[in-house]
Amino acid sequence: MNTPVGVLLSGSGTNLQALLDAAAEGTSFRIAVVISNRRDAHGLERARQAGVPAVWIPHRGKEREAHEAELVAALREHGAEWVALAGYMRLLKTTLLAAFPQRVLNIHPALLPSFPGTHGQRQAFEYGVRIAGCTLHFVDHGTDTGPIIAQGAVPVLPDDDEDALKARILGLEHELYPRVLRWAVEGRLRIDGRRVHVDLPEGEEAFVWAR
Ligand code: GRF
């Protein structure tokens, strides 16, 4: 049984691609719909290529609640039971989180709680950290503040520029997101305050270290 998941994005959609590839290879989820607030998001094209419904729901000129209600309607129409944010550049504040309680995941390109918000990789690079990474977390009303599920770490190497670091982190994102989404739909995640307990499958971990 493959659980239907809705993906929200605003950009290129390489994380969506990792999820689509995992679904094509066979996993516990399938991507039921991809929604973007930007008509030109390349992620919508990736969805179409994979035969997945791609929906543009612009936010401009709308109250936040009205826009989120449209998102919820589209997610429901396509039967989504979980929501995966993959580079979705709008905060969710109202209707959507209420409609999918503890069922919205996000990926952030930094080791939270450091460097939340936009350009996490740039913030980490400019700050001069030696270890950077990405975080999979539940979405709450804050900016990248929800309970952490899994993290991946990479070194910041002496010759790195921001783009090199970004690419190294992105590789890790593509590895971790399909894994964590599978755990989610398989009911392996339990939120306990700020902590998330993961009923880990044999041989899997909630962290990755990549050089
Ligand atoms: C990634 O860096 C992700 O961590 C962040 O937005 C970016 C999306 O990239 N939330 P892509 O569109 O999946 O390539």
Image (cartoon, rainbow, N blue to C red):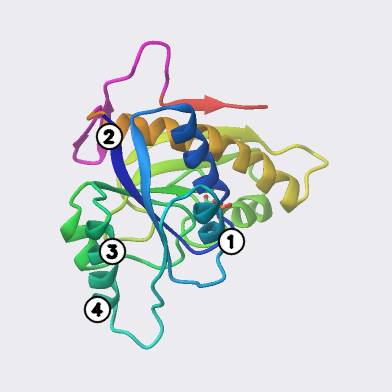
Front residue of this view, candidates 161 and 7: 7
Q: Residues within 10 Å of mark 1 (few under 14, many from 20)?
A: some
C-alpha gap between disc 1 and disc 3: 19 Å
Helix, strand, or loop for circle 2? helix
Q: Mark 3: which amino acid?
A: Ala
- Pointer 4 or 2: first along the chain: 4
Which residue, given by chain and number where applicable, does mark 2 sit on? 185
Which residue, given by chain and number where applicable, does mark 1 sit on? 42
- Pointer 1 or 2: first along the chain: 1
C-alpha gap between disc 1 and disc 2: 26 Å
- Pointer 4 or 3: first along the chain: 4
Front residue of this view, candidates 67 and 124: 67
Which residue, given by chain and number where applicable, does mark 4 sit on? 66
Helix, strand, or loop for circle 1? helix
Helix, strand, or loop for circle 3? helix
Q: Residues within 10 Å of mark 4 (few under 14, many from 20)?
A: few
C-alpha gap between disc 4 and disc 2: 28 Å
> Is residue 141 at all visible to an observer of this figure?
yes
Residue projecting furthest to the bottom: 61
Q: Mark 4: which amino acid?
A: Ala
C-alpha gap between disc 1 and disc 4: 25 Å
The reply to whether dot 1 and dot 2 touch (C-beta < 8 Å) is: no
Ligand 1 within 8 Å of disc 4? The answer is: no
Check the image and report above or below for 198 versus 170.
above
Ligand 1 within 8 Å of disc 2? The answer is: no
Q: Percent x, y for residue 196? A: 27, 33
The N terminus - image quarter:
top left
**Of the two numbered discs 2 and 3 in the rendering, the one whose residue sits closer to the viewer:** 3
Which residue, given by chain and number where applicable, does mark 3 sit on? 74
Start-end of magenta stretch: 188-205
Ligand 1 within 8 Å of disc 1? The answer is: yes
> Is residue 151 at all visible to an observer of this figure?
no
